[in-house]
């Protein structure tokens, strides 16, 4: 690429960051890293009416948790500061005036009430799609229809106005999208969008274009929902005499069942998060689940999002960050939406849990144990993680076996009824307890070998005795290998538990 790659993630602080927004940030981040470029975070807060307190901080914290850190932008600084649009307010007016003076925009004085009345009249006339456009503008109250002196007087008196883009008629807007190929729009289908308001605030369209140009953005990688705005933006670049960046509009993330974009309601309905972090709605008090609080590894979430719209061209599913950067190309992003799969997301978390060294898992497990009033050493916690990781999806699952931390308080009634025969089972376990007591090497391998010898000497099958051993140690029939559990809790505790089980179940 001839010019330096500069991309941006530009969310609006109107609420929590949707997982689709995280994917957009990820793809921008990977593209910048791949080409040795810059990744910016810009906060687009021109719509002050929709501003939500705490949303900006939430966005920044979410990106940090995901490991998608900008090298420039809000919270990071840079040569193009400020990166918060509300702090850039003064710079937009000259561009609005430039568009007016060059004939590409005009002042419009129509009030919201007047526009609402016109739309209602159009609906009654069976014209529900009325637009302020190249045809209707000449019947409206604007600087194209009013005398110049009257326009100046209205502005001087402080009468509210907006600046609208003057979309030409009968033209074709063509641009190449890196994902979708050539995209063509007719200007006859486009309305005269509001660019600037008399309160000094630009709309998204003007601020977005000005900021992308002045921040030297080379590629705009954004969601498919912005595709209808692209022809206006292309025309605005042309009107301002600027070269447009390259565009890439990402496919939607679809709900797991049925059609349509993945929403918070889908997550609530099917029991999975759609936000990276937990979010509390200040107005309603409603709390929405987050991947972090649900126990997901950030790398697992990112790996899942990587493949939700992009394909590597082979069967690889687990990627390190370096592998993501090396493999990522915009050309391998699909055009059609991808269905979100909660089960696959759990699978990714399971894979990352298995890949995490037991010592690191122990650091995550210890606080959870402490919260339950369980105190163990880091070394013991690591051994628990090593034993349980193949069966776990989340770190909290490593605590599935309370029996790894204390003797079972009770025994599964169905398991006991099915496997424990009074008299016979007690006698067998008492003999097996003596075998365990005699062992000098209490490794799982030795325990397993001696167990096989024991049942062979009794001419019994594994299924006749092993469940009794498991019930005595854990209180249940399912779980990891009994010999491994015995090695972990030690000889003294294993023998003690067998004795307790015999005393309890033989009554």
Image (cartoon, grey):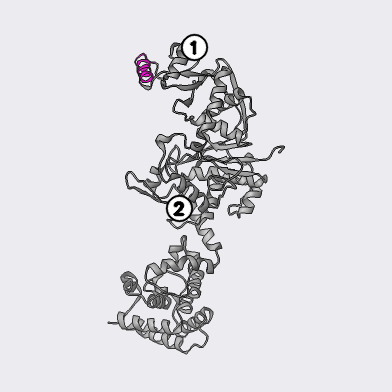
Question: Observer-nearest residue: 88 or 442?
Answer: 88
User: Which percent across, then down, holds residue 400?
Assistant: 41, 67
Q: Is residue 453 magenta?
A: no
Residue projecting furthest to the front: 156
Question: Observer-nearest residue: 488 or 86?
Answer: 86
> Is the C terminus in the top left, top right, bottom left or bottom right quadrant?
bottom left
Mark whose residue sits in front, 2 or 1: 1
Identify which residue is drawn at 60% across, 24% down.
240
Provide the secondary structure element on which disc 2 rests. loop
Residue position marked by numbered label 1 in the rendering: 148
Question: Observer-nearest residue: 492 or 235?
Answer: 235
User: Which percent across, then down, holds residue 283?
Assistant: 33, 43
- 175 lies above or below 275: above
Q: Is residue 121 magenta?
A: yes
- In magenta, the rendered stretch is 113-126
Q: Which one is earlier in the sequence, the residue at label 2 or at label 1?
A: 1
Question: Observer-nearest residue: 468 or 344?
Answer: 344
Query: Which quarter of the figure has residue 432?
Result: bottom left
Residue position marked by numbered label 2 in the rendering: 291
């Amino acid at each position: 690429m001839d010019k330096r790659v500069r991309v941006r993630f530009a969310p609006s602080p109107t609420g929590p960051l949707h997982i689709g927004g995280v994917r957009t940030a990820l793809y921008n981040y990977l593209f910048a890293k791949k080409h040795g470029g810059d990744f910016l975070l810009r906060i687009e807060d021109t719509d002050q009416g929709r501003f939500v307190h705490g949303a900006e901080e939430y966005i920044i914290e979410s990106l940090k948790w995901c490991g998608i850190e900008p090298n420039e932008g809000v919270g990071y600084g840079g040569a193009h500061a400020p990166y918060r649009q509300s702090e850039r307010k003064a710079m937009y007016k000259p561009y609005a005036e430039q568009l007016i003076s060059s004939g590409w925009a005009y002042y419009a004085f129509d009030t919201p009430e007047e526009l609402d009345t016109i739309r209602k009249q159009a609906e009654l006339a069976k014209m529900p799609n009325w637009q302020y456009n190249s045809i209707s503008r000449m019947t409206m109250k604007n600087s194209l229809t009013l005398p110049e002196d009257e326009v100046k007087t209205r502005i001087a008196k402080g009468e509210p106005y907006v600046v609208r883009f003057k979309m030409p008629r009968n033209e074709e807007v063509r641009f190449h999208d890196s994902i979708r190929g050539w995209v063509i729009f007719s200007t006859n289908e486009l309305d005269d969008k509001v660019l600037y308001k008399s309160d000094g605030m630009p709309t998204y369209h003007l601020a977005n274009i000005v900021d992308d140009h002045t921040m030297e953005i080379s590629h705009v990688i954004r969601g498919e929902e912005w595709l209808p705005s692209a022809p206006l933006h292309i025309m605005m670049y042309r009107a301002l005499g600027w070269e447009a960046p390259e565009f890439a509009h990402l496919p939607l993330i679809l709900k797991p069942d049925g059609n349509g974009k993945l929403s918070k309601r889908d997550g609530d309905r099917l029991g999975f998060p759609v936000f990276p972090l937990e979010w509390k709605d200040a107005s309603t008090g409603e709390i929405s689940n987050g991947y972090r609080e649900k126990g997901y590894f950030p790398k697992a979430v990112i790996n899942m999002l990587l493949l939700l719209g992009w394909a590597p061209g082979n069967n690889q599913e687990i990627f390190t960050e370096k592998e993501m950067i090396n493999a990522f190309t915009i050309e391998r992003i699909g055009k059609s939406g991808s269905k979100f799969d909660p089960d696959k997301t759990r699978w990714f978390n399971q894979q990352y849990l298995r890949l995490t060294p037991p010592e690191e898992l122990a650091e995550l497990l210890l606080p959870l144990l402490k919260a339950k009033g369980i105190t163990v050493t880091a070394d013991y916690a690591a051994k628990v993680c090593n034993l349980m990781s193949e069966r776990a999806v989340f770190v909290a699952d490593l605590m599935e076996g309370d029996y790894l931390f204390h003797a079972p308080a009770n025994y599964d009634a169905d398991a006991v009824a099915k496997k424990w025969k009074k008299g016979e089972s007690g006698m067998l376990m008492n003999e097996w307890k003596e075998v365990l007591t005699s062992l000098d090497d209490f490794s799982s391998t030795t325990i397993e070998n001696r167990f096989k010898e024991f049942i062979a000497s009794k001419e019994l099958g594994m299924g006749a005795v092993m469940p009794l051993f498991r019930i005595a140690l854990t209180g249940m029939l399912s779980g990891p290998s009994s010999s491994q559990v015995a090695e972990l809790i030690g000889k003294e505790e294993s023998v003690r538990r067998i004795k307790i089980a015999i005393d309890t179940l033989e009554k």
